[in-house]
Image (tube, helix red, strand yellow):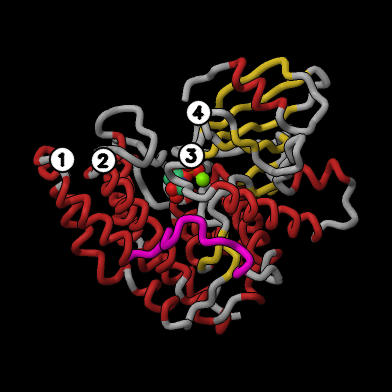
Amino acid sequence: MGLNTSHLITVFNAFNHYCTLTEIQEFSSGHINDTYLIRTTGQQYFVLQRINAEVFKNVPELIANKVKVSTHLISKLPELPIEEKHRRVLTFLPTKTGAYYHQDEFDQFWNLTYYISNSISYDTVTNKEIAYEGGKLFGKFISQTRDFDASELVEIIPDFHNVPIRLLQFKHAKQKASAERIRKTSTERLRVEALKEEMVILQHLKDEGKIPTRVTHNDTKISNALFDKNDKGLCVIDTDTVMPGIVHNDFGDAIRTICNIAAEDEQDLSLVKFNVVYYEAYLKGFLEELRDSLSDLEIQYLARGAKTIIFIMGLRFLTDYLAGDVYYKTSYDAHNLDRAKNQFKLIESFEEQYEAILKISKKYSRSSI
Ligand code: GN1
Ligand code: MG
């Protein structure tokens, strides 16, 4: 949806904030929702977001998930002044009628949060301190929601990280794909076939109850972590997909974006490399916050979790390319295919460095402490 200022003003004014909008700017990141930065006369900033109801079929429940988790996280910070709480936890504003979302006359759904000023986000990581701080931030997110009953959250996109289901969606997309898109994906389709047996293992462990379900964020790409001006972790954003899941989802998605030294859609695949130093730094920070909450088996499977999430993303981008780009926003014809190639290249680089990754895993396993 393009930027229609007068409509955005009307939507903004449906929320309870007593502020007058002076400026709107669209954020370009994000593959699903439309997000706007709003500036007001009192120099207060807000983030207004249109939720993509094609992707999120049940927006009221999605918002309820997000608000519940934010309320829980805020309860973990009783001593902090309110402004500081709003910098550390995503805070949703109610509308004038008291709901946490606004449904406009076009049946579009919106939510509003405070903008966290003086913060930085990274699309790619260039030093291991950020990787370490990111690990602490996302690790803390899971440890602070440990006492939140995950069954209170609606599984907002069922089977979001379920490999057998993603493989089924891939199969259906292949059956309907154009001959041209089938031809252009031959290498990647072979990669899927070669990897799929290994990539269903975690789902099986989950189904067998060997790996527990927790509250997980499910979209822990590094750009969803905000840092303060000293590069210390500040706040986890974009909680749209917060729902019951396994720890490997969050570990893996962060690793996927932190350890890829190139952007997710970099077309020059020679630039796509898995950075093992960042892997270790992230793992260290993550386990410092979370080690006591995790079982030996969960820790043992973290590296496999990283590989599995990279695979899932490659598979989802490939599926969307075959389906004719119906899910993710794209900027050019082969955008989804380039993203898929990028993720499969990252797996290749992960595999090339698997010995080093195993060594790191051993160093941080419980038995070696
Ligand atoms: C989507 O829209 P965004 O960028 O927050 C996707 C994630 C993917 C990500 C890939 C609901 O997230 O699962 O990891 O793109 N979100 C949904 O960058 O599908
Ligand atoms: Mg997201």
The CA distance from mark 2 to mark 3 is: 22 Å
Task: State yes or no: discs 2 and 1 in contact (Cβ < 8 Å).
Answer: yes
Closer-to-camera residue (202/60)? 60
Q: Is residue 308 left or right of residue 7?
A: left
Q: What residue would you read off at disc 3?
A: 52
Which callout, 4 or 3, points at the residue further toward the start of the chain?
A: 4
The CA distance from mark 3 to mark 1 is: 26 Å
Q: Amino acid at mark 4?
A: Ser
* Residue plotted at (48% across, 47% down): 56
- Which residue appears farthest toward the front when viewing the image? 105
Residue range in magenta is 150-163
Q: Vertical placement of 364 versus 185: above or below?
A: below
Q: Is residue 103 left or right of residue 31?
A: right
The CA distance from mark 2 to mark 1 is: 9 Å
SS assignment at label 4? loop
Closer-to-camera residue (100/179)? 100
